[in-house]
Image: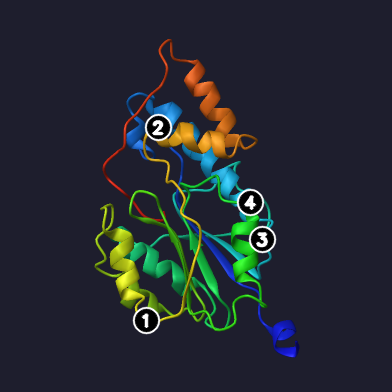
Amino acid sequence: MRAVLAAPPPTLLVVAKEPLPGRVKTRLTPPCTPEQAAALAEAALADTLRTLSTVPAGRRLLVLDGAPGRWLPPGWEVVPQSAGGLDRRLAAAFAHAAPDAPALLVGMDTPQVTARMLAEPLSAARRAGVDAWFGPAADGGFWALGLARPTAALARRLLLDVPMSSEGTGAALLDRLDGMTVHHLPVLTDVDSARDAAEVAVLAPTGQFARRWQSVAGEHTEPVRGGSSGRPGAAG
């Protein structure tokens, strides 16, 4: 019990792009316009940040490519993303976390994530003996990665040169985690296509994302449909 009480709270990291037309959710255009796609991205980011604001944490860091906007809730520190490919940017994000507390990194593409999905596995009582947390995405990527003892060197070893945006991204990362005790988080759908957006809106009907999707779909005379993007991604 003493060890549980003394356990440091985790650091939460969200990796995101500023939701500007033409820079985010480009796989939604068409059927969406760049402005609609950016509005959906903003709603997804706002929902994600709001949910993670309710998860017990010592620090909350938004690792951002761009400038913060009205969607940023209080209590979040903003740090810039590093240069390079997604593998390098994800690895560099962990350098902002203290090595003596767990760190969990989440992307901006899963607004259906709930606080319970994260708070329970990250709690001091449940994380004993866990080395890492892995959140697989339905498309073969991943939506979350956590490290019990995060260091820049460990993050680089796990993430550098992992092929991103492929059906094998998640499997490749799991191979890197071999030998570690991994807690598997639920499988979630990344929002890449219009079909993904419609599915996620149903799963989280009270969020900003669902309301924005209903508005976007209502602006089209024909139902907004979309097939699988065929290009799985990763957190961020």
**Percent x, y of residue 189:** 44, 46
The residue wearing badge 3 is: 55
Quarter location, residue 70: top right
Specify whether 169 is left or right of 125. left
Up/down of 77 relative to 153, above or below? above
User: Is label 2 or label 3 in front?
Assistant: 2
Mark 1 is on which residue type? Ala
Measure how far apart labels 2 and 1 are at the Cα level.
Answer: 38 Å
The residue wearing badge 2 is: 195
The residue wearing badge 4 is: 51
Q: Quadrant of the N terminus?
A: bottom right
**Percent x, y of residue 159:** 32, 69
- Asked if residue 216 shows in the view, the reply is yes
Q: Which mark is residue 4?
A: none
Measure how far apart labels 2 and 4 are at the Cα level.
Answer: 23 Å
Q: Which mark is residue 153?
A: 1
Up/down of 125 relative to 118, above or below? below
- Asked if residue 76 shows in the view, the reply is no
**Percent x, y of residue 97:** 52, 74
Mark 2 is on which residue type? Arg
Q: Does the residue at mark 2 contact the one at mark 3 (Cβ under 8 Å)?
A: no
**Percent x, y of residue 88:** 32, 66
Identify the mark nearer the N-term, 2 or 3: 3
Q: Does the residue at mark 4 contact the one at mark 3 (Cβ under 8 Å)?
A: yes
